[in-house]
Image (cartoon, grey):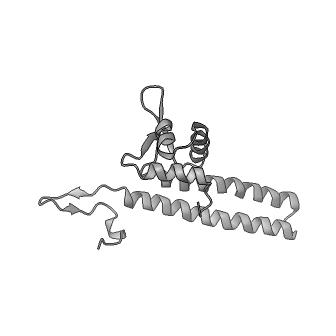
Amino acid sequence: MQAGTPKMMARVLVCLYTTDEGRLTASELVERLQVSPASISKAITFLDSQGLIRRESDGRRRERYVVDDDVWYQAMISSARSNALIIDTARQGVGVLGRETPAAARLENIARFLDFVSEGITRAAEQAREVLHTQAATVPGGSAAPGPGAAQAAPAE
């Protein structure tokens, strides 16, 4: 919630994160959180639109809402795409206002800043996904051999 996520959305997200399977149905969320189905529906719609959860069919008529190892990568990429819309709009504003105006300079600075930050977020998300999602290979004796990119990861203590 301190990061700006509305209270109910944060509760649903934490509930999903703290289940062993990382997936629950709407009715399971209603039961665990003791809230109305409408509250869950609204929270799920918001979280889905932010890329923080995904929906999967359980083979019947019910959906399960899922958080998995890829959810933060998807959320970061979604954020970068949203920034791209702001960047494009700001650059269009530069053309409308005329490059020599202070307002156009401000819009160009916004576009440049967001472009730089989004590029860094995308690059970091891709690197983290590659390093953190690499499965460690098991070697004889039961110990795990480091996977690709392990040299970049911090050693375990």
Closer-to-camera residue (116/157) = 157
> Residue 10's spot in the image, x, y percent?
55, 54
Left/right placement of residue 148 relative to residue 63 reads: left
Pick the quarter of the image with the N terminus.
bottom right
15 vs 44, nearest the viewer:
15
Labels in figure, total: 0
Residue drawn where x is 58% and y is 62% of the image = 119
The outermost residue toward the front is 34
Residue at coordinates 82% horizontally, 58% vertically from top-left? 93
Relative to 124, say whether 84 is above or below: above
List the single residue furthest toward the left: 141
Q: Seen in the image, is 29 located left or right of residue 147?
A: right
Residue 156: quadrant of the picture: bottom left
The image shows residue 129 at horizontal and vertical percentages of 43, 57
Residue at 32% of width from left, 66% of height from top? 150
Residue in the image at 52% along x and 48% along y = 12
Q: Nearer the viewer, residue 86 or 54?
A: 54
Residues 48 and 82: in front is 48
3 lies left or right of 91: left
Q: Which image quarter holds the C terminus?
A: bottom left
Where residue 133 sits: x, y (%)? 37, 55
**Residue 85 image offset from top left, x and y in percent:** 69, 53
